[in-house]
Image: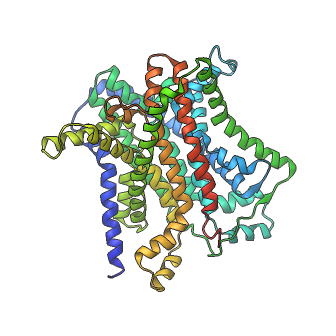
């Protein structure tokens, strides 16, 4: 078989996987531009929604990039007190949904709360919350990139007397830019798609405008048009991020993989690093968790009644993550070809991430309805509902898996791959013996992100789940919608705690997965 044959197979599989992921979002776009909404109403919602979305992406997303990249640098390449514990604790905010963090900070800082003197409200409150809740996307992707770096450039810079700050800004951060950019893109798209936190703080975004158009104004045409703008905006954003990354190379300059050197900081810098990382963990995870625990204990919550929703949540998250990661890896592998079909597959697979889960679910339902009319499927029974739900998860979170994996594969220099081919390694051997080990830290980061994202997902689950098939997110929403916020504390707490174990496992595995670490 010629060398071109395996590449053609990978491209074909990549296009197929991308179509599976993009189909619901594509259906939304097609339906949106075949139905005309009310023009005056659209103009009123559009201006406020676009301004709010862009503002939160720039401020909240920018804060997440700064927090995540700096924290990843400190725990990966610097020595300071508590570093080994903080390296996994810094990912804890990822376990809490943004809407859950919003409820926690409302209870903590609004009238009647223990910190009522510092109320977190409005646009700046939402931006602060997004920076705290979204920085783990950047942290995990950047840390995986730092962990995959060759030590040669770092050692050369240290030998030439570079300070820790200079080493970070001039060497490590540029080399890790694919991971930082991928994490930043995920954080900003998550902000663009969010509904719960923005609605709670009274900020109009495209995400909240979709629900207002659908429920408040009874205009599904306008809701679909706004949802289509989110999907198209996500594609445009990914194109801008890819253009900003350019055609620069990021592969290490040596195949020698040794333990990463750690900077020994001055006493003041050591405790400053500890304070910075500890503040992120406390504000993003420990303080909200403590608040939920207090609420659950206050009402003497019956946690045994939540065993069923907990099992359902973990099962759906595991199944959805497995399907999503398989599709994401196929798409990321196809994107390595750097041709038009590979780039198109990556963009198509990523297009659903900025759309709310409800929009993706509606797109999936529309396609299933068409298939039922054509006689391919029957009624929406239990099996079809679960299949549709897993499909919606894959379409919604394919970007969360493909972005870190693709960034990790980009670190594989063409020389290494060509050397393996010259030595007679088959395409499968190169995939399992070269590509996967080097991309392992990024793949583990992607697995963590996708699992916890599905665990937290609410709108698509509400729409597509079988009858009486509650997850923790559904149960928390049911309590909150009935204004029983104290009762919502228990499932909200379990959602967060259920994500802690995989966070600990995967973040510790990222360190051990460094290529050549055990050689």
Q: Nearer the viewer, residue 200 or 340?
A: 200
Q: Is residue 363 visible?
A: yes
Give the image's coloring scheme.
rainbow
| Position of residue 266 measured from the top left corner of the image (x, y, whole percent) | 85, 53
Quarter of the image that includes the C terminus: bottom right
| Position of residue 415 measured from the top left corner of the image (x, y, whole percent) | 52, 78
Residue 337, image quadrant:
bottom left
| Position of residue 378 measured from the top left corner of the image (x, y, whole percent) | 17, 40
Q: Residue visible at 74% across and 59% down?
A: 166
Left or right, 360 with reference to 308: left
Q: Is residue 61 visible?
A: no
Specify the farthest residue to the right.
267
Left or right, 299 with reference to 367: right
Q: Is residue 149 above or below residue 288?
A: below
Q: Residue visible at 50% across and 75% down?
A: 414
Specify the farthest residue to the front.
304
Q: Nearer the viewer, residue 396 or 173?
A: 396
Quarter of the image that includes the N terminus: bottom left
| Position of residue 60 measured from the top left corner of the image (x, y, whole percent) | 57, 38
Q: Residue visible at 46% across and 75% down?
A: 430
The number of numbered badges drawn on the structure is 0
Q: Residue visible at 72% across and 51% down?
A: 84
Specify the farthest residue to the top.
112
Q: Is residue 155 above or below residue 2?
A: above
Q: Nearer the viewer, residue 338 or 116?
A: 116
């Amino acid at each position: 078989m010629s060398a071109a044959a395996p590449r053609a197979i990978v491209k074909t599989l990549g296009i197929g996987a991308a179509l599976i992921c993009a189909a619901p979002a594509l259906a939304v776009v097609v339906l949106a531009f075949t139905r005309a909404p009310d023009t005056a109403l659209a103009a009123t919602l559009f201006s406020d929604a676009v301004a709010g979305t862009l503002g939160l992406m720039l401020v909240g997303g920018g804060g997440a990039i700064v927090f995540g990249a700096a924290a990843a640098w400190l725990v990966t390449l610097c020595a300071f007190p508590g570093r080994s514990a903080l390296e996994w604790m810094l990912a804890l905010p990822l376990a809490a949904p943004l809407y859950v963090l919003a409820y926690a900070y409302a209870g903590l800082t609004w009238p009647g709360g223990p910190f009522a003197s510092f109320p977190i409200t409005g646009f700046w409150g939402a931006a602060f919350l997004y920076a705290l809740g979204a920085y783990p996307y950047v942290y995990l992707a950047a840390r995986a990139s730092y962990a995959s770096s060759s030590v040669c450039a770092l050692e050369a810079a240290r030998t030439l007397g570079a300070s820790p700050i200079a080493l970070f800004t001039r060497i490590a951060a540029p080399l890790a830019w694919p991971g930082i950019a991928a994490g930043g893109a995920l954080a900003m798209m998550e902000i663009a798609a969010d509904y719960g936190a923005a609605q709670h703080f009274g900020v109009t975004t495209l995400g909240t405008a979709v629900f207002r158009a659908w429920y408040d104004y009874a205009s599904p045409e306008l809701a679909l048009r706004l949802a289509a703008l989110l999907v198209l905006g996500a594609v445009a954003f990914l194109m801008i991020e890819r253009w900003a990354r350019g055609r620069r190379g990021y592969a290490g300059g040596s195949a020698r993989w040794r333990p990463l050197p750690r900077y020994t900081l001055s006493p003041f810098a050591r405790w400053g690093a500890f304070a910075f990382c500890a503040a992120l963990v406390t504000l993003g995870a420990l303080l909200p968790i403590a608040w939920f625990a207090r609420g659950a204990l206050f009402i003497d919550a019956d946690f045994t009644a939540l065993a069923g929703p907990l099992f359902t949540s973990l099962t759906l998250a595991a199944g959805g993550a497995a399907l999503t990661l398989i599709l994401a890896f196929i798409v990321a592998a196809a994107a390595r070809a750097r041709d038009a079909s590979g780039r198109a597959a990556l963009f198509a697979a990523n297009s659903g991430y900025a759309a709310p889960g409800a929009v993706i679910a509606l797109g999936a339902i529309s396609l299933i309805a068409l298939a039922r009319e054509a006689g391919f499927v029957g009624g929406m029974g239990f099996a079809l509902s679960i299949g549709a739900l897993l499909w919606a998860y894959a379409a919604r979170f394919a970007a969360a898996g493909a972005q870190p994996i693709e960034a990790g594969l980009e670190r594989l220099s063409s020389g290494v791959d060509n050397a393996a081919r010259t030595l007679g390694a088959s395409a499968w051997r190169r995939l399992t013996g070269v590509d996967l080990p080097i991309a392992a830290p990024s793949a583990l980061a992607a697995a963590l992100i996708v699992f916890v994202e599905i665990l937290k997902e609410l709108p698509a689950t509400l729409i597509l789940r079988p009858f009486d098939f509650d997850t923790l997110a559904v149960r928390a929403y049911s309590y909150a919608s009935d204004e029983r916020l104290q009762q919502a504390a228990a499932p909200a707490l379990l959602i967060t705690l259920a994500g802690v174990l995989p966070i600990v496992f995967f973040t510790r595995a990222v360190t051990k997965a460094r290529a050549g670490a055990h050689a």
